[in-house]
Image (tube, grey):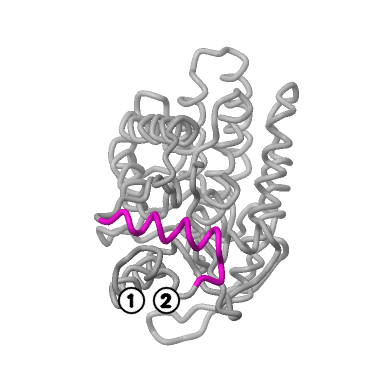
Amino acid sequence: FTVEYNYNSNHLEGNTLTYGQTELLLLFGKVSGEGHLKDFNDMKASEVSVKMMKEEAANNKDPLTQNFIRTLHHTLLREDYTEYRTLPNGVQSSFVIHAGQYKTRPNSVITRYGDRFEYASPEETPALMSDLVDWYNEEERKGELSPVELAALFHYRYIRIHPFEDGNGRIARLMMNYILSRHGWPMIVVRSRKKQEYLEALHQTDMVVGSIPSVGAHANIKQIGIFLKYFEKLVAKEIQTDIDFVTRKDEDLWWYDGEIITTRSKNTAHILRLMRESPSITYAELTSSLGINTSAIQKLVKRMVENGYIARHESGAWRVIATSVV
């Protein structure tokens, strides 16, 4: 979960680190290949934020507070920083992103349909966040909504407020997992490769709820039916993936980023197994073991590198990123 969640949640927001770089950084504390320093630091801060979220969720006796959300945001962003942008007229503009503080300037997004969608204003944000937290604690106490419904509705309401100047999507996904984990449900990953499904579910729900931010921030479970349906499918898929990973035992079965690797040739699984057993294996040795020509081996390996299943160290040794269940 650690690698998959952090890779996908940050990749959704434009982080350039590969799955392999993320794994190497978070599991082994090492840096490999090219990448922006900010992307590496953001990924490490994301992992600290996940740990903080899980610890807070485990303490399910205390109510949710705004202070926790702001502290989580400060941990995620690490510190204040200046954002530079070029306006349509060519003029350079800059503004400070504040870690752990609610926004001081309006924010909005241009949808993929070309229209501007406004979030809550800075003036109304503190009151809307107070309403959100109070609503969550009361709904949790009443127990009328399932944990999945609570997580989906909190995520949607939070996104309509967009209380911070940056990092809102990442905080929304941390908080939905906070709610699921707090109630004993498995945490989930919104896959970056399925970003459009995620955004479209939110957009279609916005069309039902309406464009007024304060209305979106107080949406009810019936109004967000489209997003809830998407979210329920996401949770079901993650649970099924967890079950499959535990129950399906086959030496030719490999996983990558939450899905079974499907290929037309069993040689892919054989190469992965041989590289895992002998990281310094050569093309000649692979050819000898598999009984196919070197050119075919090189094409398979090239495709596996492009897909992110394997990576090669500067020393020449192979690192297998895909996971085997046996």
Question: Which segment is the magenta one?
Answer: 265-281
Residue at coordinates 56% horizontally, 37% vertically from top-left? 177
Amino acid type, residue under disc 1 in the picture: Thr
Q: Specify the quadrant of the image occupied by residue 65.
A: top right
The N terminus lies in quadrant = top right
Q: Specify the quadrant of the image occupied by residue 291.
A: bottom left
Residue at coordinates 71% horizontally, 54% vertically from top-left? 75
Q: Is residue 34 above or below residue 26?
A: below
The reply, left or right, for residue 283 in relation to residue 138 is: left
* Residue named by callout 2: 284
Query: Residue 157: within the magenta?
Result: no
Q: Is residue 250 above or below residue 149?
A: below
Q: Secondary structure at mark 2?
A: helix
Q: Is residue 267 above or below residue 285?
A: above
Q: Are the two marked residues, 2 and 1, in contact with CB atoms closer than 8 angstroms?
A: yes
Q: Main secondary structure of the magenta part?
A: helix
Q: Nearer the viewer, residue 30 or 213?
A: 30
Amino acid type, residue under disc 2 in the picture: Ala
Residue 35: horizontal and vertical position, in percent?
56, 76
Q: Nearer the viewer, residue 153 or 235?
A: 235
Residue 73: horizontal and vertical position, in percent?
66, 51
Residue at coordinates 56% horizontally, 72% vertically from top-left? 280
Q: Specify the quadrant of the image occupied by residue 39.
A: bottom right
Q: Nearer the viewer, residue 244 or 268?
A: 268
Q: Earlier in the sequence, mark 2 or mark 1?
A: 2
The reply, left or right, for residue 284 in relation to residue 124 is: left
* Residue named by callout 1: 294
Q: CA distance from mark 2 to mark 1?
A: 7 Å
Residue 237: horizontal and vertical position, in percent?
39, 34
Q: Nearer the viewer, residue 242 or 99?
A: 242
- The label shown at residue 113 is none
Residue 184: horizontal and vertical position, in percent?
60, 24
